[in-house]
Image (spheres, rainbow, N blue to C red):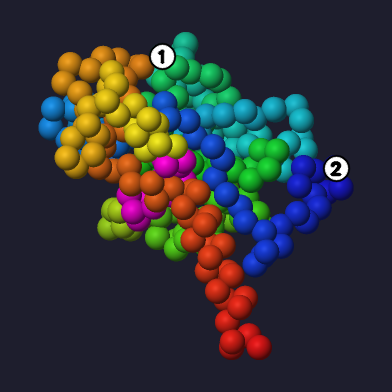
Amino acid sequence: LPLMYASYRCFEPGKDIVMPVFTSLSQLATSPYVAEGMPRGGAAARPAPKRRLLFHFRGQILRYVPTYSFGIRQQLLGLYGCKTGKEIANPKDLVGVPWCGPDVVVSDRHTTNYLDEMANATFCGVFPGNGWGHIESPLLLGCIPVVVQDGILTAWEDVLDFDSFALRLPRAKLPRLAEELRAVPPERVAALQAGGRRVWERFTFSSLGLAEKRRMCGGTHFTAAADGCVPRLGAPGGKHSQAFLASSAITGQDAIATLLQLLRARLLERTSPERG
């Protein structure tokens, strides 16, 4: 343990705060929730994808650095890693690999389809790397986070009703991860997805998008209106378009707002007469 990453205590409950990592505006634009909130005349809302994958994890693994990720990512790759889709050179390669199939993706290979894969998965892995695991992208894309990092909190885990939108499994269950996920009842899956829909924005920095929208009001992408800024007809589309900022799903109740609300609540608790 002395050689492991995070082998010393660096979090004090009630004092320290684990916040989400920064997500860019371009990544915010990929969220199906943002697309669903687009007004008529704005960018077309994409239909919610039918999630064909049971589980997805694609990220850095460092196979030959056993101290990285407490060895969890390496163990995951050994248990479930396989070649899938177009990467399959020979179907015989899949024989004997536990739960290796078309609905489980575990890989350390880069792909341009990374976000599409995650948006098509029901469950997404959240594992430690150099620190706590990243839960932001799964929630942004409507994928249920599955956290496996014993004794390590992830962002907002001790602040929000974590069990309403994410699963936490002990590392001891990692060898049965796929079986555990297949056994989750459909009604529980639906409840977790609904929970993720309620909290996803708190894992983003969407208020920066609202500030950008105000800055651009009256310019190329937005025009001033009685109720604020609305997408300008004929505004440029494509990957450089900012029209997605008109989505009603972007409210500004993001990580920054959550942090301020938490600090205010802690201050009130600290100054409460009941505390003496």
- Could you classify mark 2 by the number of other residues whose Cα lies within 10 Å: few (under 14), some (14-19), or many (20 or more)? few
Circle 2 is placed at which residue position?
3
Q: Amino acid at mark 2?
A: Leu
**Horizontal and vertical percent for residue 53?**
36, 34
Q: Residue at x 29, y 37 (%)?
A: 34
Displayed quadrant of residue 55:
top left
Displayed quadrant of residue 118:
top left
Q: Residue at x 70, y 27 (%)?
A: 63
Q: Quadrant of the C terminus?
A: bottom right
Q: CA distance from mark 2 to mark 1?
A: 38 Å
- Could you classify mark 1 by the number of other residues whose Cα lies within 10 Å: few (under 14), some (14-19), or many (20 or more)? few
> Which stretch did the figure color magenta?
195-207
The mark lying in front, picked from 2 and 1, is: 2
Is residue 81 shown above or below 162? above
Q: Residue at x 46, y 52 (%)?
A: 257
Q: Amino acid at mark 1?
A: Lys
**Horizontal and vertical percent for residue 15?**
68, 64
- In the figure, is residue 50 to the left or right of 120? left
Identify the residue at the far left of this view. Answer: 40
Circle 1 is placed at which residue position?
86
